[in-house]
Amino acid sequence: MLRLDSTDADFAKKFERLVEDRRESGENVARTVTDILEKVRSRGDEALRELSARYDNYFLTDDQATWRIAPEDCEAAFKALDGKLRDALELAAARIRSYHEVQLPGDRDYTDDAGVRLGAKWRPVDAAGLYVPGGRAAYPSSLLMNAIPAKVAGVGRLVIATPTPKGEINPLVLAAAHLVGIEEIWRVGGAQAVGALAYGTDRIAPVDVVTGPGNAFVAEAKRQLYGMVGIDMVAGPSEILVIADGRNDPDWIAADLLSQAEHDPSSQSILITDDAEFAEQVEDRIDVQCSMLSTKRVARSSWDEHGVMIVVPDLAEAPALANRLAAEHVELAIDEPEAMFGQLRHAGSVFFGRHTPEAVGDYVAGPNHVLPTGRRARFASGLSVLDFMKRTSFIEMGEAGLAAIGPAAIALAEAEGLPAHANSVRLRLS
Amino acid sequence: MLRLDSTDADFAKKFERLVEDRRESGENVARTVTDILEKVRSRGDEALRELSARYDNYFLTDDQATWRIAPEDCEAAFKALDGKLRDALELAAARIRSYHEVQLPGDRDYTDDAGVRLGAKWRPVDAAGLYVPGGRAAYPSSLLMNAIPAKVAGVGRLVIATPTPKGEINPLVLAAAHLVGIEEIWRVGGAQAVGALAYGTDRIAPVDVVTGPGNAFVAEAKRQLYGMVGIDMVAGPSEILVIADGRNDPDWIAADLLSQAEHDPSSQSILITDDAEFAEQVEDRIDVQCSMLSTKRVARSSWDEHGVMIVVPDLAEAPALANRLAAEHVELAIDEPEAMFGQLRHAGSVFFGRHTPEAVGDYVAGPNHVLPTGRRARFASGLSVLDFMKRTSFIEMGEAGLAAIGPAAIALAEAEGLPAHANSVRLRLS
């Protein structure tokens, strides 16, 4: 864990090093992914068989049941949930749905002073593919967060691809798929699954957008296929920045920092406070709480390697630091969070006040938990219905409208050396 | 030029081949670009000197004047424009501005039934870099189309990078820069310019978003840097689809097809009509008009290599074909364009009726001319203010709100095996 004090002489240098540290995999996966994608593009299902056997120890055969998970299995998994968990999933789904419904963009259609009709129409993509990781990161909450915006956008075909190593699959994921009404689930994972969704194979029809979390190979496959399909974003390790004064319960803040740390050893938790003693209390509580977690190995590693505590003389310094960090999650555990929020220019999602732990945003608050990481909040936004929609602009002119603005188009086309552009307007004016 | 008749037995096969033909550079530029970006990342301005000398025959020295174009030069270029052209640029800028102002997204802030306050706030990125190509493709209209949405979004720092081969620069581009108020213009081009904008160098501060057209190296550099910065989109060769009945003037439609063809030899112009005789007339007019164009070499090559005429028995077949093509520009030169527009699911921009040539959209109509190419209208949209903004979600709960939905978060966190997530809620509830 790194301790910084903003009054130290070398603080600026150390803080910049923190800002530049992306904690992203140095592993050179690009070439492996390029090879895998080329195999899937050229040999389709045959490549999926080969790669699933190699990477997932899972054997796809001529039996379609080895390729797809039946909707009946999802329904059974949903019905088998204990009542409290089913209610929680349903509450989460309902709240996520209602938040994302508010995001639906409006079309535009107006006629301006020159008599030119202009507008834009939003439509959903035809098909979206949702990657769901196997193993530790197979979170039903991620499935809801990716699938529901697509459904709200009006996407007609929504497909899941998920690896089932040795045939195993998390029943909670199946239950969540049933809850949101996804019936097309393919048992393929890794970069090969992303390739199959983008290129299509004999069995799997191609999609237009691929979203969802995954390991470095999945992320790299999405990056390489971006432009051939739409993707949600390039995602890195998760992070939280907690800005807290000394009047918080150190146990609460410790839990918030650990909730980030337990995700992954490369996750990062940062505390900014104006109270050095409070920082020490939080650190003590982290030690105590961490020792009791079933995730302690991951949480400890993350906190030891990437945890940061920054003490500042005045929290008025915090927004400038937060804007440099452009963190995925920012908690404002202070009395007047709104005033500080007004000074935050870059953040994925912000949690106001002392009673809004980040974890509620992961599950049930409603806003999406797929958020820009690694300082990408400087230019990127959380997942929304817009990621599953696109906009077509339109223009309509009659003779009067063309007479009003056509001559300017002719002048510009000629200046740019594009005479056929000019002709297409001039012929209609004469 | 390819002639297709939808009643031919092998039409489906030939049409699919057309759909799959992306006309994109097979040139292997990826490795060259990777090398260039690594040079810029590690050696900064020194690499820019070396690469500008090599690729642009332009020599950057210790004299800052060799690096930047002075705002006074832009002002002088603007003042030197002939009056008609200056008026045309000003009309274009005003109309583009007013169309994009309507795109500004609204913030959200509401409290739901559970007493949870939810919202989202849009903010501009801090800095955007606009690439402007040198040589033939240095279009002032592109500068307006990229810069104005950024300005409307509220971007504080807007930077141009443009190559000046042998020191030359298009005065129209300088004039357009003056008109939109850009004062920071760097004389660097190619992949190295995109790298400098993304990574920053000693002289050039980094930006958050890079947009603008460029050659295959520029496009590949943007693709490789996507995720480190935001980019507009992966762009390929331009295309137009004209859907026209036989009651159009064949000269008008010929000009429209040629206006696309004259852009680049890899551009594509496609006509769908229900009148075979009309198609022949259009072809004749293309031959006549093309021979008179100063751009005839490019236009001829594009039309001969990539031009397509599809005759269908009934234009009711057109929307299904258009949706497969998902073209950048679609003209509906028919009596009731609106009804057909309702059936178009995928198109970058649509031009209604007989008096709306695509070229007005390139210059003065108002909607952006930076549009998805190569079937990307399936999932992508034209450039807009949203490309220069990002959204931060926020959540605020008091004790009552947390009591209402916190228990569901605990249940889900425990089911996902994330006990610190559960703790962070549970501690606040007890």
Image (cartoon, coloured by chain):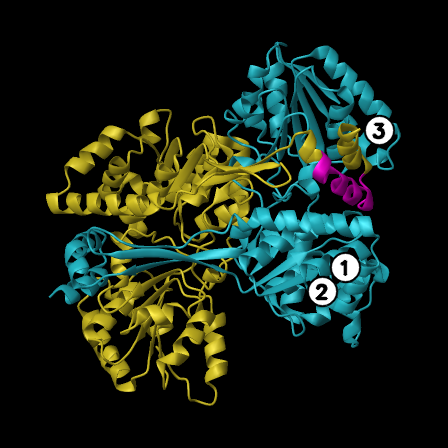
Chain colours: A yellow, B cyan
User: Residue A338, percent across and down?
Assistant: 33, 68
Q: Disc 1 marks which amino acid?
A: Leu
Q: Is residue B237 visible?
A: no
Q: Disc 2 marks which amino acid?
A: Ile
In magenta segment, residue B340: no
Is A108 located above or below residue B4 in the figure?
A: below
Q: In which quarter of the image is residue B37?
A: bottom right
Asked whether the beta carbons under mark 1 and mark 2 sit within 8 Å of each other, the answer is yes
Circle 2: element type: strand
Residue corresponding to mark 3 = B290
In magenta segment, residue A413: yes
Q: Which mark is residue B185?
A: 2
Q: Quadrant of residue A153?
A: top left
Badge 3 or badge 1: first in the primary sequence: 1
User: Residue A132, percent across and down?
Assistant: 35, 44
Q: Is residue A60 left or right of residue A377?
A: left
Asked whether the beta carbons under mark 3 and mark 1 sit within 8 Å of each other, the answer is no
Circle 3: element type: helix
Name the residue at 22% across, 79% down: A247
